Image (spheres, helix red, strand yellow):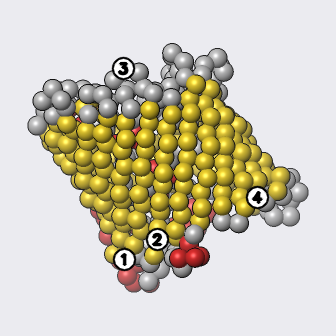
Amino acid sequence: MAALALLASLSFHATGEEPRGFDELWNHATLHKDGQNPILEEFKLRGRYQGQYSDVDADHGSQSRWEDRRSRFGFDAKLFEKRVEVRLDFQSSDGFEDIYDGLVDAYIRWKPVTWLSITAGKQQPNIAQYDWLNSNLAQPTFERSQIFNQLNVNRVTGLAVEGKAADLTWRTAVYSNDTPNTTDGSGAFGDGEFGDFNAGISLTLGAGYDFEKPLDMDKAEVWLDWLHSDRQDGDSELGKYNDVVSATFIAKQGPVQLAIEAFHARGGDGTNSDVFGFYIEPTYDILPKTLQLVGRYAYANSEGPLGVQGQFRYEREVAANKGLGDSYHSLYAGAQYFIHGDGLKLMAGAEWAWLGNRTGNSYAGVTLLSGVRASF
């Protein structure tokens, strides 16, 4: 992998451009493209792979391992003058023990007019514009924020409507809370891939405003989203809190970008007490389209003594207190090396985290991460 990065670097410096061979290779994923076809304008394969190595060194213990973190395959199709979009992809399990381990996205999106879209099927709930709704392919960190990861938000089956008026975007949706994440391991479509619709129901309502023109910036937007869950016992998704509110601010000018996102979740049972958290994530392009630095500060606090959870893959794996507490601080510093944009990149980072516990069994540790992400 180091040799691949070196060759890519030499190509960049020799030509000043990304090697054309990567564009030609990635273009093979588009199997059909014909703007004059009245039925099927485009059919494109989708795939991604994320592999990473982590090393946790904490006062509660240590752990190191390699993960085939994400591997997915599917397709996108655009039909009927691009008014209908179809997406279908599935995932494999870590280590590829099961090639088919459940659907990820499986939906149909209809755009009857340019300013309105209606999406039906398995999709991402409309919450957390930066940390969740933005593709993880473009994420500059290995993990989403701690506060988001403890909310139990995952893909669900639902019906979403989104509209746009000038610089204002609004969206609303209804979802079922019982969408399963994986099959039974048989390798075939499991029963209830889209859920059995016998669990709780969730609703979302949100709006965003684009103000990059008034501020004369490359990007400037704010979002406010609310998710309400009429949850029931046994809900597999969206069943942890009654209400979640997220507020997002994203600004970019030249090589600098800043994202700030805050969350408040209420109505949890037991250890899932009301919780508030936010993170601040700046990035800086040292070499445009080649090398980017990223930092993040994250904070969370809960009303109950065990209402905050550490990051599942790292901190909770070694913490003696099961990674539970009432306050959380973390600092992340890392870099991305782009070989073919977000389509092929190398990543490295380190995160220090402290999880306070009223019983005195607090956690402190550092996680080192390195890996590769590829997608088409």
Q: Which mark is residue 287?
A: 1
Instruction: Determine crowd level at label 4: few under 14, some 14-19, many 20+ residues with C-alpha closer than 10 A.
Output: few
Q: Earlier in the sequence, mark 3 or mark 1?
A: 3
**Image vertical order of residue 256 relative to residue 157, above or below:** below
**Picture residue at 20% right of the left edge, 26% below the top:** 321
**Where's residue 186, x and y in %?**
54, 20
Q: Earlier in the sequence, mark 2 or mark 4?
A: 4
Q: Which mark is residue 238?
A: none
The amino acid at mark 2 is Lys
CA–CA distance between discs 3 and 1?
48 Å
Image quadrant assignment for residue 41:
bottom right
Q: Provide the residue designation for mark 2.
A: 252
Q: Provide the residue designation for mark 3.
A: 270
Q: Provide the residue designation for mark 4.
A: 115
Query: Badges 2 and 4: C-beta atoms under 8 Å apart?
Result: no
**Picture residue at 64% right of the left edge, 32% below the top:** 175
Query: Badges 2 and 1: C-beta atoms under 8 Å apart?
Result: no
